[in-house]
Image: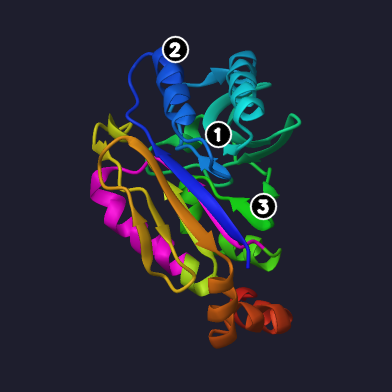
Amino acid sequence: MTELKLTLIQFARRSSPSENLERMLNLLRSSSNTHLIVLPENWYYTGILPIDEYRKLTDRLSEFVEEEGSTLVIGAHYVRDGETAVSRGAVISTGNVWIEYEKHHPSSAVGERSFLRPGDKIALTTVKGVKVGVVVCVDLMYPEVVRGLALRGTELVVNPASIPVDRVKLWRHIGAARAAENTLFLASVNNTSTMYPDSRPVMGGSFVASPEGSIILDAGEEEGAYTVTLDTTWIDAVRRRWSFLLDVKCRRQEFLRRYYLFN
C-alpha cells in the first residue's frame, strides 16, 4: 500500500503580484506535513511574465520547498521565452530538482492562441512512490493527453486550472470521466473570488476524483488549503475490475487503426 498526502491550494488572486506571492507563501506555510502541494493556473499574475521574473518566482518557491520538504506543483503562468510566449510551470522537489511542463493546447475560447505557442514539455515524476503527471487547464479536454500519461504509469494526474463558475460543473464531470476511464486519481485546483479574462467570475470548485470517478474532495468556494490522503490500493482494486487501460495497452495498434486513422 502506498499513501500520498495531497494538498490543493485554492487561491483568491488579487491585482498585485507581490501581494499574491506573499499570501501564497503564507498558505503554503500552513500546509506543512503534506507530500504534494498543487497550485492553480495564473495565481501570481494574468499577464505575460518576462523569463527573468518567472525565474525569480520559481526560485522563491524553490526556497519554500527546501524549507518544508514537500514537492510543489507551482501552477502555470504565461512566460515570455524568446520571441514567443508559452504557458509554463514546474514540479519542484527538494535538492533543487525541477521538471517543467507546458500547456499543449492554448485555449481558443479566450484567445490564448493569439499570443501563446503550443507547449511540448511533459512533467512526470514520483512522489512518495506514486507516479504523478501534470495536465494544464484546458488540456484536460483532450482525452489523449491524460491517456498518454496513464499509459506511462501515472497514478495521479494534477490539473492546475482557472475555470469560470459556469463551467465548474462541466469541469468536474470531465475530470471524473478522465479518472474513471484511466482508473487513476485526478486532482484539479482552481482560483477563487476573482475574474476570468472575459469577466466571468471564478469561484473555486477544486476537486479530487477517485479511480472510480467519484468525487472524494470538494473545495467549495472558499480560499484555502484542502488536503486528502490517496491510497493507491484503490487503483489496484479498480483495475482488477475495469480493464479499460489494459485493453488500450494490449491492443494499441488495433485502437489506432480502428479509431484514429481516418481517411
Residue type at mark 1? Answer: Ile
Q: Earlier in the sequence, mark 3 or mark 2?
A: 2
Rendered image quadrant of residue 171: bottom left
Mark 3 falls on what kind of element? loop
Please give the range of residues in magenta. 154-178
Horizontal and vertical percent position of residue 97: 74, 34
Q: From mark 3 to mark 2, how far is it between C-alphas? A: 32 Å
Horizontal and vertical percent position of residue 213: 41, 70
Is the C-beta separation of discs 1 and 2 under 8 Å? Answer: no
Mark 2 falls on what kind of element? helix
Q: Earlier in the sequence, mark 1 or mark 3?
A: 1
Is the C-beta separation of discs 1 and 3 under 8 Å? Answer: no
Indicate left or right for 159 with 3 as reference. Answer: left
Residue wearing tag 3? 128
Residue wearing tag 1? 74
Q: Earlier in the sequence, mark 1 or mark 2?
A: 2
Rendered image quadrant of residue 214: bottom left
Residue 44 in sight:
no
Q: Residue at x 60, y 19 (%)?
A: 60
Indicate left or right for 95 with 240 as reference. Answer: right
Indicate left or right for 151 with 209 as reference. Answer: right
The front one of 94 and 49 is 94
Residue wearing tag 2? 18
Q: Residue at x 57, y 61 (%)?
A: 146
Residue 179 in sight:
yes
Residue type at mark 2? Answer: Ser
